[in-house]
Each structure stands twice: as C-alpha cells, then as structure tokens.
Image: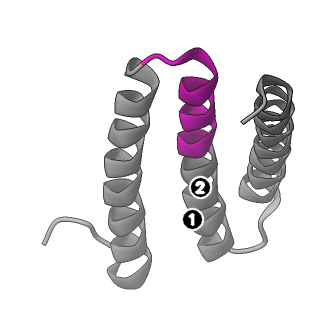
C-alpha cells in the first residue's frame, strides 16, 4: 500500500473520529433523557478507543492498543452499571 494513501486515510479517520466524539459530547450534555446520555457516553468511549487505535497505527507503538483495550473494558463495565442503575435505581444489591 502506498505511504500517501495510508497517511491520508489515517488523517481522515482521525478527523472523523474526533468529530464523532464532539457530537457524542454534545449529546451527552444536551440529551433530553438519561438513556440518551448513557448511549452518548457509550459512543464516546467506543470512539476514543478507535481513535487510540488509529494513533497506534500511525505511530506503530503498542501502548496505544493496550490503552484502547483498557478503555474498552472499563467502558463496558461503566455502561452495564449505568444501565442497571437506570433500570433499578441501585447498582449494588
């Protein structure tokens, strides 16, 4: 694959992921219901995880992939806890 094509693909992906993160933050602060805010938070952590992966592709460093794995695991746990809180009103029974 050409270096130029890879460079521009990664640059465009970073820009679009940053824009998606901005829209998710907007929805998180503006969402009319709590469910919308939880979904925006879920989208935000997925986009940040993907942005770190793109940084890892660009730089060739392994630490970005490990950080995205940690964000993915913590984000999943946070989403489950928030969904349980919204359904039952308590997280720990």
Single out the residue that lies furthest toward the left: 93
Placement of the C terminus among the 4 image quadrants: bottom left
Q: Main secondary structure of the magenta part?
A: helix
- The answer to whether residue 79 is above or below residue 33 is above
In this rendered view, identify the residue nearer to me: 47 or 25: 47
Establish if 54 lies above or below 42. above
Q: Are marks 1 and 2 in contact (CB under 8 Å)?
A: yes
Seen in the picture, residue 2 relative to 19 is either above or below; the reply is above
Question: For the point 39% across and 83% down, which residue is it?
Answer: 87
What residue lies at 17% left-to-right and 65% top-to-bottom? 92
Which residue occupies the extreme front position in the image?
A: 1
Location of the N terminus by quadrant is: top right
Which segment did they paint magenta?
48-61
- Front position in the image: 84 or 25: 25
Q: Residues within 10 Å of mark 2 (few under 14, many from 20)?
A: many
- Asked if the magenta segment contains residue 81, the reply would be no
Residue drawn at x 41%, y 73% as measured from the top left: 83
* Residue 51, numbered circle: none
Vertical arrangement, residue 32 with respect to residue 73, above or below: below
Give the percent coordinates (x, y) of residue 70.
33, 38
Q: Disc 1 marks which residue?
A: 38
- The residue closer to the viewer here, 7 or 76, is 7
Q: In terms of image quadrants, where is residue 5?
A: top right
Q: Which residue is mark 2?
A: 41
Cα gap from disc 1 to disc 2, whole angstroms: 5 Å
Q: Secondary structure at mark 1?
A: helix
Give the image location of residue 65, x and y in percent.
41, 32
74 displayed left or right of 6? left
């Amino acid at each position: 694959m050409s270096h130029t094509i890879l460079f521009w693909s990664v640059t465009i992906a970073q820009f679009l992921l940053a824009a998606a993160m901005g829209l998710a933050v907007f929805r998180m602060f503006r969402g009319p219901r709590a469910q919308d805010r939880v979904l925006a938070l879920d989208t935000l952590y997925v986009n940040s995880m993907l942005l770190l992966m793109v940084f890892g592709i660009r730089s060739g460093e392994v630490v970005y992939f490990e950080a995205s794995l940690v964000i993915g695991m913590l984000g999943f746990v946070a989403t489950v806890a928030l969904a349980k809180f919204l359904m039952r009103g308590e997280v720990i029974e």
